[in-house]
Amino acid sequence: MRLFTIMAIAALTGCATEVPAQVSGVGASDAQHGRLLYETHCGSCHYEKLHTRKSTRIDTLAALKGEVARWSLQTSRRFTPAEIDDVAAYLNRSHYRLSK
């Protein structure tokens, strides 16, 4: 029922009809939610060039998630493991493009 409702709303509002993996039960990270979390809780200290510098320790998805988890402790909000995955998914999609 929930999936049908989401698809109906998307169709009526002209949105893409692709169902996010998280809703369809695959359990994938939500990069859009990660972007919102990043911009709200991380963006005040970070800037775009931070993620594009040549000297980085982040060379795997696991390393990226580890850094997000480590730095999330500096925010005013405690991130859940799912939120850490979401922020990492956003950063990977927007900056790192890691495959492993």
Image: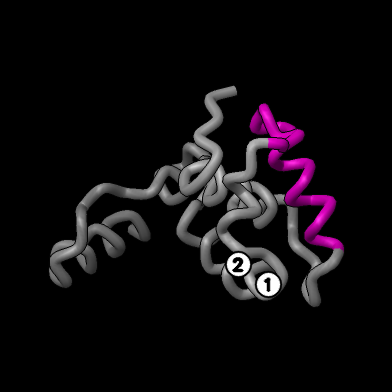
Q: Residue at x 63, y 70 (%)?
A: 43
Which amino acid lies under the numbered mark 1 shown in the image of this protein? His
Instruction: Indicate whether 52 appears above or below 12.
Output: above
Q: Nearer the viewer, residue 95 or 52?
A: 52
Helix, strand or loop for the magenta stretch, by majority: helix
Left or right: 69 in relation to 39: right
Task: Give the image location of residue 89, x and y in percent.
Answer: 55, 45
* Marks 1 & 2, CB-CB < 8 Å contact: yes
Q: Nearer the viewer, residue 94 or 36?
A: 94
Q: Residue at x 23, y 68 (%)?
A: 9
Q: Secondary structure at mark 1?
A: helix
Task: Give the image location of residue 78, x and y in percent.
Answer: 80, 67
- Identify the disc placed on residue 37: 2
Kindly report the distance in space between the C-alpha atoms of the residues bearing marks 1 and 2. 6 Å
Left or right: 36 in relation to 47: left
Residue 80, by quadrant, is bottom right
Residue 66 magenta: yes
Q: Residue at x 69, y 52 (%)?
A: 84
- Identify the disc placed on residue 7: none
Q: Secondary structure at mark 2?
A: helix
- The residue carrying mark 1 is 41
Magenta-drawn segment: 55-73
Please identify the residue farthest to the top as the structure is shown: 100
Q: Residue at x 64, y 47 (%)?
A: 85
Residue 39 magenta: no
Which amino acid lies under the numbered mark 2 shown in the image of this protein? Leu
Task: Give the image location of residue 30, x and y in percent.
Answer: 50, 52
Q: Nearer the viewer, residue 66 or 20?
A: 66
Picture quarter with the C terminus: top right
